[in-house]
Amino acid sequence: MPVDTLVPTAEATHRDKVTTRRARPGAATAAASVVLGTIVLAALLAPVLPLENPEHTDVSALSAGFGAEHPLGTDALGRDTLARIVYGARVSLTVGLGATAIGAVVGTLLGMIAGLSTGWAQAIVMRLADVLLAFPALVLALAVIGAVGPSATSVTLVVGVLFVPGFVRVVQAPVLSLAQREFVLACRAMGMSATRLMLREILPNIIGLVVTYAVTMFGLGVMIEGGLGFLGMSVPPPAPTWGGMISEGRQVLAEHPVVTLTPTAVLVLVVLCANVLGDRLTAVFDSRGAML
């Protein structure tokens, strides 16, 4: 056996070090996890936290600044900004998680079908995905929600459907490659059913890719809900939403910009944390693939 096959080359050693370093969590990942976890925990515990009623108006503190009674001030109607941000998180995070779950489950299933099938089944799935991708997402969402009425359920369903084509595209390409691998061909030769093949052999090999993409799409779902709320097409008032708070704050933007800037900062922070975690998961799964 040649000696150079036993002694790792400098290039291989450098590649291993880079792979290990990329797989190691950093300060940004830890900070993003803490911030996003804190916001999620606050949203879950909102009913038991010492917060004011987010719909209660205090006429003695209209557009008030930071203070002991109202830590983040109040809006133009005297409603506590901190309480409305926490309760608004329940809407935004629910829509983001729900829409991502719908897109991941339906899109992954259709992507595996398109990757393992040939002929009409693959053509139908991919053409449907192309049709949905051809429509401007926000215009389609506004049209559907305008027809059925704004609510958390309608927004979640519409955004979830809009996420399906992306998951189909992400899943179909690696499944096409896996379909030609020896273990898949052997399972087919032994007569394994398509459902069992997808669940037992294909899904475990693409789950990392799906989770990574889902984390990024969660942030996008929160952002889309914020945009719809800004346009008045999310949960109707007086229920708080981050987008609705930003829109309402325009009335006093010049005198009290904090009314608009605070929910904007929280929305940006959630999306940023989701992107950071998505990048970290991508590095982790890429490093695992490189070590195989």
Image (spheres, rainbow, N blue to C red):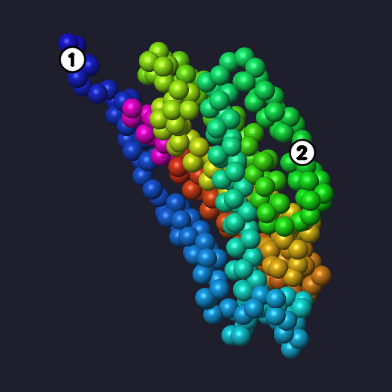
Element type at mark 1: helix
Residue 97 % position (x, y): 57, 51
Cα separation between marks 1 and 2: 59 Å
User: Quadrant of the image for the C terminus?
Assistant: top left
**Residue 136 tag number:** 2
The residue lying at 60 percent from left, 63 percent from top is: 90
User: Quadrant of the image for the N terminus?
Assistant: top left
Q: How many marks?
A: 2
For badge 1, the amino acid type reads Val
Relative placement, left or right, of 15 versus 222 is left
Q: Which residues are magenta?
A: 283-292
Extreme residue in the top direction: 1
| Lower sequence index among marks 1 and 2 | 1
Q: Nearer the viewer, mark 1 or mark 2?
A: 2
The residue lying at 61 percent from left, 85 percent from top is: 69
Picture layout, residue 116 above or below residue 22: above
Picture layout, residue 200 above or below residue 99: above
**Residue 3 tag number:** 1
The reply to whether the magenta stretch includes residue 160 is no
Quarter where residue 17 is shown: top left
Picture layout, residue 281 above or below residue 153: above
Q: Main secondary structure of the magenta part?
A: helix
For badge 2, the amino acid type reads Pro
Relative placement, left or right, of 26 versus 157 is left
Extreme residue in the bottom direction: 60
